[in-house]
Amino acid sequence: MTVLAPLHFADPREAAALAAFLTRLVHYDRAAAVRLRAGGGALAVFGRPPSFDVLAIRTARLVDAVDLDVTVSAGELLEGIEESAGKAVVPDSVTGPPWAGVLPPQAGWRPVDGLPDAAEMRGAVAAAVAEFRARDEELSEDRRTRAERDRIGREIWSRTLGPTGLPLRAVHAAQSLGFLPPADTGAPVALFASGPWLRLRTPYGSIALRTVPMSLSVTPGPSA
């Protein structure tokens, strides 16, 4: 077992913000894992909330220039955060889920135009939730199945936000995880693209997703 030194945050409020993020992740999945990457005085925490099919990213500034790349239990990391002291104990590593090996690129991002402001995005999520409830209530008893509800949900949440190509499920994830700014703050939100990836960035965190599914190729070995 490798014992890692505690992470010390540049501002105790960043420890509290990370704890809030982890609390939401664990709410969706008690067995959630997160990948931690630190370097140059910055920490990035990657998680994957169930159902949304996106990656959630929370960053924080560190006092020391720590080099770290490890996957850990989100719940254990949450237990190791001392908000008042502004530090976190990194738990033992765990076997990472498949998504932890496919992270968005660190560079090469370009701005994407056409993103509505936070108020409009919240309105779009509210309208989608209302549509789902209305269509669910209209289902006859024999059609009110999990499969049919999932089909309706996929149809609604896969719709893109205007010309951006960003699916509504990404905005829903941002709101559910506390990343989407309140409508009356005027806090900036922005959308970026890099290859097959989109990244919705706000002052509270980012949501990233691939617009093209991963494809695995098999290279045949030499013949006997």
Image (cartoon, helix red, strand yellow):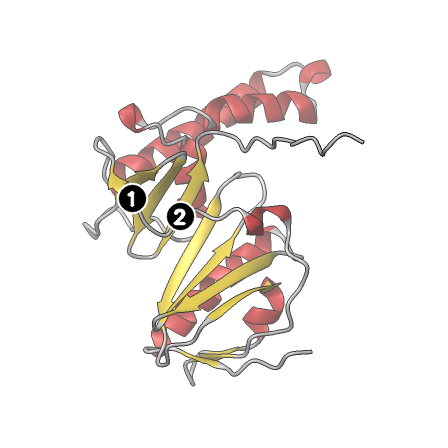
Q: Are marks 2 and 1 in contact (CB under 8 Å)?
A: yes
Q: What amino acid is at disc 2?
A: Pro
Q: What amino acid is at disc 1?
A: Trp
Give 150 or 127, whichever is nearer the viewer.
Answer: 150
For the point 57% across and 30% down, the residue is 215
Using the image, determine if residue 17 lies above or below residue 220: below
For the point 61% across and 16% down, the residue is 139
Q: Position of residue 216 (x, y in %)?
A: 60, 32
Which residue lies under the disc numbered 1? 109
Q: Position of residue 11 (x, y in %)?
A: 32, 77
For the point 52% across and 30% down, the residue is 213
**For residue 220, what is the image quadrant?**
top right
Q: Quadrant of the N terminus?
A: bottom right
Give 157 or 103, whichever is nearer the viewer.
Answer: 103
Between marks 2 and 1, how big is the CA–CA gap?
A: 8 Å
Element carrying mark 2? loop
For the point 34% across and 71% down, the residue is 40
Q: Position of residue 91 (x, y in %)?
A: 61, 74
Q: Quadrant of the C terminus?
A: top right
